[in-house]
Image: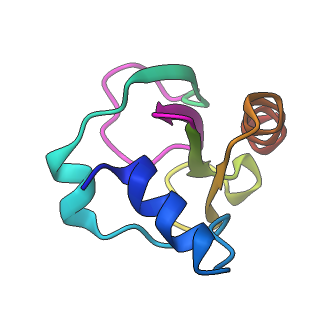
Amino acid sequence: MKISNWLDKKQEEKIDVSQIKVPLEMFYDEDPDEMIYFKEHKPCGYFCAQNHPFSKVERFGHWYYCKGQDKKAGIHSSDMKWHLFTKDEKLALKTAKKHIE
């Protein structure tokens, strides 16, 4: 089952899908249709392999998946991770940009 169909089904069941956790195997089985936005805060250089704050928006069908790590968490932190599912592209972009600025 596609992620967008799964989200539609959960929404029909009156579940708030904005913060739902999609089973990981679904992400392994399906690539996003489009990467809308990606930004990473990586002041320590290109070759640093540690965690860095980031924001991204991907489209799965008519759903937008925003996720990242808040810039306020700091460099090399694994705290303050966030995600959001929405059908509103403008809201998805606004949310992603807010977390990385």
Q: Is residue 77 left or right of residue 46?
A: right
Q: Residue at x 77, y 54 (%)?
A: 72
Q: Is residue 41 magenta?
A: no
Note whether 56 is above or below 77 in the view shown: above
**Quadrant position of the C terminus in the picture:** top right
Note whether 24 is above or below 95 in the view shown: below
Magenta stretch, main secondary structure, is loop
Q: Residue at x 38, y 19 (%)?
A: 46
Rendering coords of residue 88 (x, y %): 76, 37
Q: Residue at x 15, y 48 (%)?
A: 29
Q: Is residue 35 left or right of residue 99?
A: left
Q: Nearer the viewer, residue 48 or 6?
A: 6
* Numbered range of the magenta stretch: 44-62
**Quadrant position of the N terminus in the picture:** bottom left
Q: Nearer the viewer, residue 76 or 15?
A: 15
Q: Nearer the viewer, residue 77 or 94?
A: 94
